[in-house]
Image (cartoon, rainbow, N blue to C red):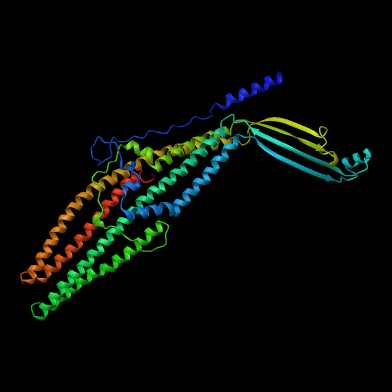
Amino acid sequence: MKNYINMSFLILVLSVLSACKVSKDVETPKPALPETFRNAATTADTSSIADIQWRQFFTEATLQKLIDSAIAKNYDMQIAVKNIEASQLLFKQVKWNNVPQVDLNVTASSSRPSDNSINGLTLSQADIGTKHIEDYSANLAVSWEADIWGKIHNQQRSALAAYLQTEEARKAIQTNLVATVSQGYYNLLMLDAQLQIAQKNVKLNDSTLRIIKLQYDAGQVTSLAVQQAEAQRQAAEQLVPQFEQNIAIQENALRILTGQLPDRIERSSNLDAMVIPANVATGVPSAVVSRRPDVKSAELELQIANSRVGITKAEMYPALRITAQGGVNSFKASNWFNVPASLFGVVAGSVVQPLLDHKRLKTDYEVAKVDREKTVLQFRQSVLNAVGEVSDALVKIEKLKSQQAIAANRVNTLQQATKNANLLFKNGMATYLEVITAQGNVLQGELELASIKRDELSAVSELYRSLGGGWK
């Protein structure tokens, strides 16, 4: 009865000590956030485009197929999934740290000591008819370390946070993939449009060149006019293989990004058909902290840092280890399993306090605290970067919209000027230089307009990504 009371008291003491923490966790800091993003439209609506699933945000059929393929086949995504699997296995394994370690030991030995040794003399005096010492043993050994200072608990907590980090890493990769694929596709559509512009301009220059050659034959212009018109046509013609090259490279890049061999990509739309959303709601800045995978990963890193501090602090305190061993043991094989005569059992408890390596353990603890402080700073930096990326995307969308309106008006003006110059030239009221200049200006204007449209679409994709959208 007395032993039962003592054991109950010991278990109670261990339970109380296990509930105590040897280190205090640092709470996730609350970073200073603005009420609204810079350049965001003032509205009472707190919804965000990041809450929209990517399929509903990117509705173009070919783009959806490319994103689907990237999520399923991209090798970075597949590696991220494997990292999740590995981390999950480690997390399941660390749960067993509280379970006693059990080992099965089966040994058999036979030795022939020297006749002049103590064992040899003892055998001779015993006159047992053999000069061999035999030992046969089969036992179970159990060892268990009491989690007094929460070391095992912190190991489990760290493993859980590391597992959750791999999931956030997968989300971050998918978010970046969705944005990168969409931006690559928009760039491809822009190159298509620019190729058509260049080809159209080549035909326009061909028509002008034919008229100038007729005038040259009639003695109305010099050979200089023909040469300049020819050079203008060649400049436009040179753009055609350049755009064809860029199209092929962009197609290859998209195919590789989607886990496929380089090849042509069939398009179901063109740049003019792509609609830029009129309303790109951003929601409140505080939502970015809970939605962006990289910020969530930084928050989980703080949990891991807290656990490391707890583990290194626990290493400095005494460790209580309990061991037990029991089985059968005999000096003869014939009596090995003679029960109960061959039964034996040993129970022991020990308290281990590090002494000579205390300085090293203390240093590990201090380094862990410094690393935790760095993690806090990194978390704050990740939040600051997130808010900055959203603000950058918003200002791009706003200013590109203004540029697009100006560029569209300029192109309309240049197109009208080109038509007028051609008419005047045909009627002898304008020089060939005026026609060439007008055609060169409209070419550059149309190319710039296509580029601005691409930049607008890419800025919207970047805003969607920076708000934490794309992983749903």
Residue 219 to residue 258: above or below? below
**Residue 240 position within the rendered picture, expressed as x and y whole percent measured from the top left:** 26, 68
Q: Quadrant of residue 227?
A: bottom left
Quadrant of the snapshot with the C terminus: top left
Residue 317 to residue 217: above or below? above
Residue at the spot x=24%, y=43% of the render? 279
Name the foreground residue: 56 vs 208. 56
Residue at the spot x=29%, y=46% of the render? 393
Residue at the spot x=40%, y=63% of the render? 262
Residue 183 appears in the figure: no
Quadrant of the snapshot with the N terminus: top right
| Residue 213 falls left or right of residue 16 | left
Q: Quadrant of residue 51?
A: top left
**Residue 213 position within the rendered picture, expressed as x and y whole percent measured from the top left:** 14, 77
Residue 322 appears in the figure: yes
Residue at the spot x=78%, y=39% of the render? 137
| Residue 228 falls left or right of residue 59 | left
**Residue 155 position within the rendered picture, expressed as x and y whole percent measured from the top left:** 55, 37
Residue 17 to residue 467: above or below? above
| Residue 396 falls left or right of residue 16 | left
